[in-house]
Amino acid sequence: MKIVAIIPARGNSKSLRNKNMLKLNGKPLIYHTILSAKKSKNLDGYFVSSDNKNILKYCKSINCATINRPKNISGDKTPMLAVLQHADKYLRKNYNICVDVFLVLQPTSPFRNHIDIDNSIELFKKKKPDSLVSTMKVPHNFEPYSQYEQVNKFKVIDFMKSKQKITRKQDKVKTLARNGAIYITSRKNLKKYIFGGKTIHYPMKFYKSLDIDYLEDYIVAKKLFKLIKNEVI
């Protein structure tokens, strides 16, 4: 079974400009995911998929293999499935690599490390599902029973629209959320989905689930890295 990680890193980001190359502890954000993939003992390879020349150049400078992604599948609305489908064809044509299992490791999850990668792969091998997603516990005040749908600037309505409003923490159903750090799927599923069918989850700590999408996330990540540097690396 050949297991390969794809690190998607397009150049144009609307939420936080050039976020994949923002510095975290003196290194570009993408470096931390590449390092985690490099340290993994269960990966047979890892590749950065990008449309950006600077990102591709940087990855090559640190001996990370790359996939030249065309602009037409590098927009902010491009589904990740299209990126994986392209990567599959590209690896076959340019590297003569036939992948059995794909991982998606987003650079915006810098606190996911090689231990998480290896543990999730081992879980996938053991349980033999169609797909795996990494998750985090949803804080009780963020759970569905605590959420509202915004109607306008000042008006909100109960998101769950439940007949019985549950307010006590101990009465709420415990929920999980995908944190975007790890996705695993077999190549045979790439015609349909990245995650779907029989799906299992790999639980991660709250701080490891930080996803850098906005400036506030980046500020928190820089502070957090200093506090937990040894555990992350």
Image (spheres, rainbow, N blue to C red):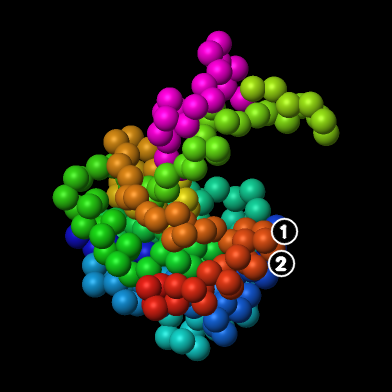
Residue 162 on the magenta span = yes
- Given the image, on which type of amino acid does mark 2 rest? Arg
Q: Residue furthest top?
A: 163
Under circle 2, the secondary element is: loop
Image vertical order of residue 85 relative to residue 97, above or below: above
For this rendering, which residue is in front, 162 or 26?
162
Quadrant of the rendered structure where residue 108 is?
bottom right
Residue 125 shows up from this direction: yes
* Magenta span: chief secondary structure: loop
Identify the residue under disc 2. Answer: 17
Relative to 43, residue 24 above or below: below
Q: Which residue is mark 1?
A: 14
* Residue at 58% across, 61% down: 212
Q: Residue at coordinates 44% horizontally, 61% vertically from top-left?
A: 208
* Total numbered badges shown on the rendered structure: 2
Mark 1 touching mark 2, by CB under 8 A? yes
Residue at 24% of width from left, 72% of height from top?
41
Query: Where's residue 176, x and y in %?
Result: 42, 40
Q: In screen coordinates, is 11 left or right of 136?
A: right
**Residue lying furthest left:** 126
Residue 149 magenta: no
Q: Position of residue 192 (x, y in %)?
A: 41, 39
- Where in the figure is residue 104, as x and y percent of width and height? 42, 58
Numbered range of the magenta stretch: 159-177
Circle 2 packing at 10 Å, graded few (<14), some (14-19), many (20+), is some
